[in-house]
Amino acid sequence: MAGHIVVTGGSGKLGRAVVRDLVEHGHDVVNLDRQPPADPVAPFTRIDLTDGGQVFEAMRGIDERHGGLDGVVHLAAIPAPGLATNTATFANNALATHHVFSAARSAGIRNVVWASSETVLGLPFEAPPPYLPIDEEYAPRPESTYSLVKTLEEQMAAQFCRWDPQLKMYGLRFSNVMAPEDYAAFPSWQDDPTARRWNLWSYIDARDGAQAVRRALQHDGTGSEVFVIANADTVMTRPSADLAAEVFPDVPWRREVSGTETLMDIGKARRVLGYEPVYSWRTS
């Protein structure tokens, strides 16, 4: 069912794919970002998400953009550790997310999908994961300020939903986002299994990430949930079990994996959201 949706960070790599996918599926979309997109497919409004007044106003209405919203997709953030100082990363990301969550609730918007991160699972796995494949069942293990904020955002979402039982807030733990042009680098990793050990050789095609966002928006539910979102395969040509045996020999297995199957278990997203990756670096 089509609706009026704002996407924060709609000018970024994942954001552009999300905006395009939602528009193609009939939604009226507004991109809220600091910078306009290079290839606009939806109306753009400049915003500073650390300014609470701007965010609260944006959720209630913007002239010539929207007069009310059915859903919010929150992707905007400093997108990785090290791109800014730790304090700047914390101040920007935590405050922006609080403003978006609070403003959405204040405006009566009950459908919020937002970008959590694979980093809450313990990346870069200097300490090995507790088991393989990894999933949503073990407690977050943030190893950076960026990841710490994502962990706090998950807790924030849970408390917002406790305050408002009609609210739906789905956090998508995206793997490393790749666009088709990024696939040219994949062959360079094949001779060194440690080059991508930091996230278990995982990735998410931006177009499949967009599919996950759309399915999360469309899912009929309430409460706070988190989902691992990755592609069905790894970035490597070697079998996943062989890679893990070499790099993480002492980590127990919860189930067998076949071929180059991802070691980030996407079973919950498949089961609950109907998510199924379509794209792969092997065929794109």
Image: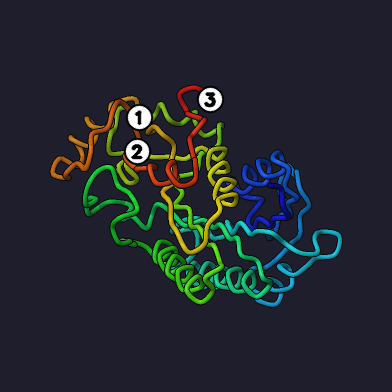
Q: Secondary structure at mark 2?
A: loop
Q: Are marks 3 and 1 in contact (CB under 8 Å)?
A: no
Q: Which residue is mark 1?
A: 236
Q: Position of residue 208 (x, y in %)?
A: 53, 38
Q: Amino acid at mark 1?
A: Met
In the image, 126: left or right of 121? Answer: left
Looking at the picture, does residue 193 appear above or below residue 41? Answer: above
Q: Earlier in the sequence, mark 3 or mark 1?
A: 1
Q: Disc 3 to disc 2, how far (Cα)?
A: 18 Å
Q: Amino acid at mark 3?
A: Ser
Residue 201 marker: 2
Classify 10 Å Cα crowding around label 1: few (below 14), some (14-19), many (20 and above).
many
Q: Amino acid at mark 2?
A: Trp
Q: Secondary structure at mark 1?
A: loop
In front of the other: 255 or 124 = 255
Q: Secondary structure at mark 3?
A: loop
Residue at left 34%, top 53%?
Answer: 136
Instruction: Examine the rendering and report whether any part of residue 150 can be seen.
Output: yes
Residue at left 74%, top 70%?
Answer: 60
Classify 10 Å Cα crowding around label 2: few (below 14), some (14-19), many (20 and above).
many
Q: Are marks 2 and 1 in contact (CB under 8 Å)?
A: yes
Q: Earlier in the sequence, mark 3 or mark 2?
A: 2
Q: Disc 2 to disc 1, how far (Cα)?
A: 7 Å
In the image, 78: left or right of 154? Answer: right
Q: Position of residue 158 (x, y in %)?
A: 45, 69
In the image, 37: left or right of 257? Answer: right
Q: Earlier in the sequence, mark 2 or mark 1?
A: 2
Residue 284 marker: 3
Residue at left 65%, top 45%?
Answer: 16
Instruction: Examine the rendering and report whether any part of residue 175 can be seen.
Output: no
Q: Single out the residue that lies furthest toward the left.
A: 250
